[in-house]
Image: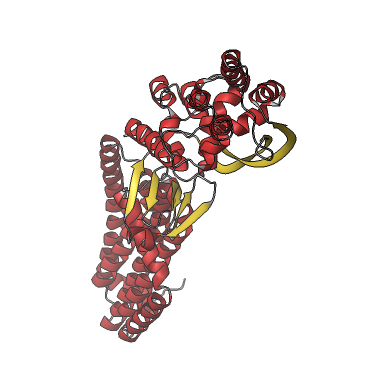
Amino acid sequence: MMYYNVSMFPVLDSLKQNWLLIAVPLLVFLATYIVGLWTRRVAFRAFERWAAKQKWEGYRFISETTRSPFLHWFLILGAFLAVHLSALQPAQKALADRVLASLFIISVTWVSIALSERLLRFYIRKVPRLHSSETLFVNTARITLVVVGVLMVLDVWGAPTTPIVVLLAVVILVVAVSFRDTLTNFISGLQLVQSEQIKVGDYIKLETGEGGYVVDINWKNTHIRSLEGDLIIVPNSRLLGQAVINYGRPLKKASKPFRFYTRVHLKELTGLKAGSLAELATMISQVPESVIYYHTHHFFEEHHFLIPEPANDFALWVSNELGCEVLGEKLASIDAFSFPSINALRARIEAIINDYLAQNPDGHRARPGREFHFIKSVSFVLPTPYIAHDLREFVEALKQVSLGSLFYHVFEARLRLKKGVNDFSLWIEECLGDKDLADRIASLDPYNYTLENLRSTIVQLVEKRIK
């Protein structure tokens, strides 16, 4: 039988003599771990109850992201306490402290990055106008947290961080100077979003005269869709730096949009002429409608700045060339706007002339070369880029269309539709259901206004309605 001396195993001897120096740190480490399990359970339950009471949707991101790292932090704390209760040398303890502090900073940094990314994506996706800036926000948060974490780790290990901080400051300054416009627009975009003074869907007008509906506000520009359908891109800083009229949200949408048209008239000689009243009456009954239209409407359009309405060509010729001033006054008194069709207007002119001839059979004859020459109006109707879906778009477009377009929709519409009403009133009543406004516009006698005054009057009626 062999006997062994305990002194032959120095390790066992050392453990026997210093078992408390080993057991106590180990027990503290285990106790810290158990406390961490209990603390995590209590803390997360309390946090969940609070979040449910506040109805905060972001609590689940915090819970899912920090559940495991929360326990890791208690393990690091337990290791820290165990090291300081152990028999390690001071230099060894200092090294362990640095390692544990670095692990803690790395863990916190990783959790912060993951949590900030999830929260940013969650809330940004709730704001459609920030969708295009999602990646920018997330990357900015990542870089910022990584830089802070690296600086903290370097500080733990005693590395000189001042040069790094100065270098970062210089880099940030250079970037800020190089991208000052971009940064200014970014900050301005945040102000626009936060203040909500201008929102997507608002109709705005800039002091430069541009206007339209805001369709997007991103981190750099604001996109505006004009009434012509053009996309106006305005830098956010420029938008904040000027006076802007915000008319607010869109009004009631029309069941069918209103498209503004204009038309161009060409004069065409027909080769027909009249030298007396009898010949004039005969030709009036035979010529196409376009001839009657030209001789009763073109003078008003060409001299739209005159009020009351000027006489038609028939009245002027009868008075000036035939000397029949009484008949000329009767023809001039015809209100062309009151007739629903060209044929009705033709019948009225013909009847007045025939009545005069019945009482004055010996009508005068024009001098040679001064006969009445019949001219035909050839019209070309052209679409304009202006389309209105509501009254606000309608009134803004009306301010910009040509007088030819106004004439087409007000004067020619009555004869074209044969309803005795203009295109504006018809659209407002049928597509917007606003009969009162439609009747107000329809009741205007356009022959008592110049075309510009007529435009202004209609604009005032519509603007009063939408205020």
Where is the C terminus found, in terms of image quarters?
Answer: top left
- The structure residue drawn at horizontal position 40% and vertical position 60%, both measured from the top left corner, is 113
Q: How is the image coloured?
A: secondary structure
Q: Quadrant of residue 269?
A: top right
165, above or below 370, in the image: below
- The structure residue drawn at horizontal position 26% and vertical position 70%, both measured from the top left corner, is 21
60, above or below 13, in the image: above
Between residue 127 and residue 275, name the one nearer to us: 275
- The structure residue drawn at horizontal position 28% and vertical position 81%, both measured from the top left corner, is 89
Pinpoint residue 438: horizontal percent, then vertical percent. 43, 24
Pinpoint residue 286: horizontal percent, then vertical percent. 72, 22
Pinpoint residue 210: horizontal percent, then vertical percent. 43, 53
Q: Residue furthest front?
A: 362
Between residue 160 and residue 200, name the one nearer to us: 200
423, above or below 306, in the image: above
Residue 22 appears in the figure: yes
Between residue 82 and residue 189, name the one nearer to us: 189
Left or right: 309 as drawn, with respect to 149 = right
Left or right: 298 as drawn, with respect to 244 = right
Between residue 353 and residue 363, name the one nearer to us: 363
Left or right: 120 as drawn, with respect to 268 = left
Pinpoint residue 141: horizontal percent, then vertical percent. 39, 63
Give the total number of marks visible in the rendering. 0
Q: Quadrant of residue 97?
A: bottom left
Residue 259 appears in the figure: no
